Image: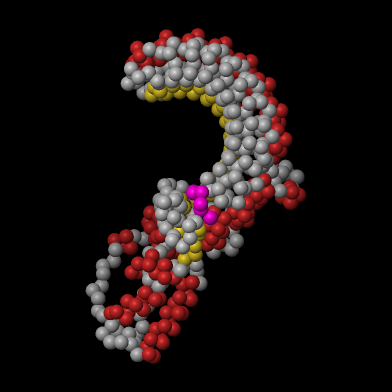
Amino acid sequence: MGANNGKQYGSEGKGSSSVSSDVSSSTDHTPTKAQRNVATSEDSDLSMRTLSTPSPALICPPTLPGFQNGRGSSTSSSSITGETVAMVHSPPPTRLTHPLIRLASRPQKEQASIDRLPDHSMVQIFSFLPTNQLCRCAHVCRRWYNLAWDPRLWRTIRLTGETINVDRALKVLTRRLCQDTPNVCLMLETVIVSGCRRLTDRGLYTIAQCCPELRRLEVSGCYNISNEAVFDVVSLCPNLEHLDVSGCSKVTCISLTREASIKLSPLHGKQISIRYLDMTDCFVLEDEGLHTIAAHCTQLTHLYLRRCVRLTDEGLRYLVIYCTSIKELSVSDCRFVSDFGLREIAKLESRLRYLSIAHCGRITDVGIRYVAKYCSKLRYLNARGCEGITDHGVEYLAKNCSKLKSLDIGKCPLVSDTGLESLALNCFNLKRLSLKSCESITGQGLQIVAANCFDLQMLNVQDCEVSVEALRFVKRHCKRCVIEHTNPAFF
């Protein structure tokens, strides 16, 4: 590995063997045996010194995404194995010269312009680099090595890719970041490892033990993690506010470990500080699990339960009892949620701003009336595929939620121009409207909407029987509106 490091470091950071090669090629005579022994001894000492402070450089296949630091992605290569791993490299050594060896005289190069910048400016530049590029910069020279590992540059770690050895990468990174503060990464606040299917509970244990200041964790699509690892993270990271476990099919609950619950004082109330929770595609989540989540995560403001197909109205009743501050809620594709569930959701009243009930086939005008009556500050409603909604439900919604900005009632065949007229006359701030596959909609209803909702920015009328003249009318009155349609005559 030392030879590989020497190649990566370039002229300013060659290993001891490279230095010896350069020296032998530039001398006027062959060194004596004593001289070679002295040089070899000092090269060995140098090697020992550089390996005493290891630094992780992340080696990724050239065609796969590697480490990121929140912006962009790029890769570095490894030809040793077919998998992505985190390897340990030493900081680049300075060039060694022995007094007994006379080097050929070379013209002294001028200092590079970037080397004239002060340290704080260099750190500012490095802050815009993704993680893997930051690791590469650490190989340039000793100064860059020290600057690249400035703790202020490591508030976020982002890993992507299905083949990356995430558990090992997290272990190496956290070990390096804990160098100045043993066993604790005080600066690390965000860890994003979405789509890393090789992440296991071991990787989450590493995060839980080393990152007490963690505020955001995203592990979407990592289906190998279990409840126990998630419990450890939320128990040992008291400041965690944002948790995304979407697609983690083994996660059925969010709670504290038993040990953490025992240690907490009664004043703490055994609560978790999570405010944002995404459990989309957690198929095995049931009402009892949602009950536990609600009882422990009472500060929730954003909750997404898309395609949690086992949830029923009973689970929503538990949710509203404990989590009274929810602003955004999605229960899309939860086929057992009905009007009774919407009656419970309506108890959130004016705090609710975003609601998605798409493809909940048991919802009718009755449930919409509950929401419209009590959630007057609703801004976004997605009711696509709720075939029980009619013009009466849309009319009641428009009159009570006049500040509505986005509405999706696509695939609601019972909604017609009458319902659109109610929207146009009450919801003047409407910016996004989706009517996809609404068979009863005509061009007349669109013209009424366009004549009253001047701020309309997106209109979806795909698979609707509307004329070209109606679409042109919308374009003339709503100049900023993007129209999604299936009429080949309109362009």
Coloring applied to the structure: secondary structure
Q: Is residue 118 magenta?
A: no
Q: Main secondary structure of the magenta part?
A: loop
Query: Eyeballing the image, is 231 above or below 111?
Result: above
Q: Where, quadrant-wise, is the C terminus in this rendering? A: top left
Number of numbered discs overlaid on the protein picture: 0
Query: Residue 38: x, y in percent?
Result: 41, 86
The answer to whether one can see residue 162 in this image is yes
Q: At x 41% / y 11%, what residue is drawn?
A: 443
Q: Is residue 163 magenta?
A: yes
Query: Residue 165: x, y in percent?
Result: 53, 55
Q: At x 54% / y 64%, what residue is drawn?
A: 179
Q: At x 42% / y 62%, what residue is drawn?
A: 138
Q: Is residue 204 left or right of residue 75?
A: right
Query: Eyeballing the image, is 370 above or below 269?
Result: above
Q: Is residue 409 left or right of residue 474?
A: right
Q: Residue furthest left?
A: 107
Query: Residue 134: x, y in percent?
Result: 42, 57
In the image, the segment drawn in magenta is: 160-165
Residue 478 figure quarter = top left
Q: At x 74% / y 51%, what residue is drawn?
A: 259
Query: Eyeballing the image, is 460 above or below 301?
Result: above
| Foreground of the two, 217 or 306 | 306
The answer to whether one can see residue 373 in this image is no
Query: Residue 440: x, y in percent?
Result: 49, 11
